[in-house]
Amino acid sequence: MEEVVVKVGVPEDLKEIAEISETEISLAVNRFLKKRLLEIAEIERILSKSKLSEERAREIAKEISVS
């Protein structure tokens, strides 16, 4: 797997309140990103099996929001 470097800025006041080390912040961001990326992958997997066209899905969503 290709390594991607992400730089995240954490406000100083947040660091002081939680007294979080850079290592802990890095681990938390890693866990958060992994969870979100897995969720996105699962959604894409489900959507890839959908037989609805994107336009028809929008029409249905519009009908639902109107009612």
Image: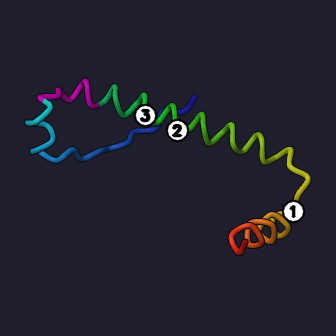
Label 3 and label 1: CA atoms lie apart by: 31 Å
Contact between labelled residues 2 and 3, with CB atoms less than 8 Å apart? yes
* Quadrant of the frame with the C terminus: bottom right
- Residue 39: image x %, image y %? 60, 37
What crowding class fits label 2: few (fewer than 14 Cα within 10 Å), some (14-19), or many (20 or more)? Answer: few
Residue 43 magenta-drawn?
no
Residue 22 magenta-drawn?
yes
36 sits to left or right of 12: right
* Quadrant of the frame with the N terminus: top right
In front of the other: 67 or 26: 67
- Residue 46: image x %, image y %? 77, 41
Res 66 → quadrant: bottom right
Residue indicated by mark 1: 53
Residue indicated by mark 2: 36
Residue 24 drawn above or below residue 39 = above
Residue range of the region highlighted in magenta in the rendering:
19-25
Across the whole image, how many numbered discs are drawn on residues? 3
Residue indicated by mark 3: 32
Type of amino acid under label 2: Arg
User: Looking at the image, is mark 3 or mark 1 earlier in the sequence?
Assistant: 3
Residue drawn at point x = 14 percent, y = 37 percent: 15
